[in-house]
Amino acid sequence: MKPTTKALAAAAIAFVLVHVNAPESPNVPSVGPMRALILHDNTQDVQLPAEQQAVYHSQIIDQWLDEHTPKEADGEHSHRVWDVQTDVKNMPQVWQDWMRDTKAKATKLPWLRAEKGRKRYNGALPKDVPSTLEVLKKVGE
């Protein structure tokens, strides 16, 4: 019996979470605030399925992240949706580092990076809002 597409997608997410969640160094705290970055390319977005583009502007994703990420000094929650060309030189250092590191690891855009302590996802943006929310919940709860 062949596995369904849904089963394969769930297995792929589980595989990535298990392998990405391994600590990169013993200095990474096991707990900590959640942070998330969706990196995309405005010039290529029109080629993406509408369901995936919807993640960028999803009130469901935004509300969930607002509830699970702390506010920063500027009053914004610790999540961003940025074009790959976003100029971050005047952003807080943590976001400059995140942009640099995420761009270095992103093999294909759009890309999602989410972390909470040692729980991490650093991979392709899931195909739609429900799939993205599922990944975020696995990292953030």
Image (cartoon, rainbow, N blue to C red):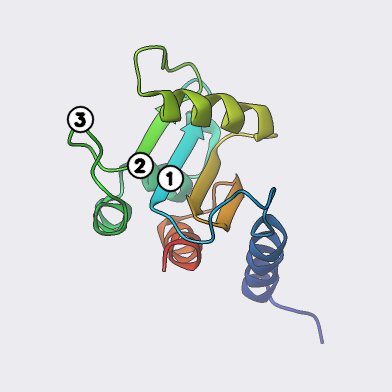
Point out the residue furthest to the left here: 75
Q: Earlier in the sequence, mark 1 or mark 3?
A: 1
Q: Identify the image quadrant of residue 21.
A: bottom right
Amino acid type at mark 1: Ala
Q: Tell me how far mark 1 sits from mark 2, CA to CA.
A: 5 Å
Residue at which label 3 appears: 74
Which residue is at a point 65% across and 66% down the rendered structure image? 9
Q: Circle 2 — which element?
A: strand
Q: Residues within 10 Å of mark 3 (few under 14, many from 20)?
A: few
Q: Nearer the viewer, residue 57 or 46?
A: 57
Which residue is at a point 43% across and 62% down the rendered structure image? 140
Say whether marks 3 and 2 touch (CB < 8 Å): no
* 65 with respect to 82 (left or right): left
Amino acid type at mark 2: His
Q: Residues within 10 Å of mark 1 (few under 14, many from 20)?
A: many
Q: Circle 1 — which element?
A: strand
Point out the residue furthest to the bottom here: 1
Give how far across and how far down residue 49 sits, in percent.
50, 44
Which quadrant is home to the N terminus?
bottom right
Q: Tell me how far mark 1 sits from mark 3, CA to CA.
A: 16 Å
* 116 with respect to 16 (left or right): left
Residue at which label 1 appears: 36
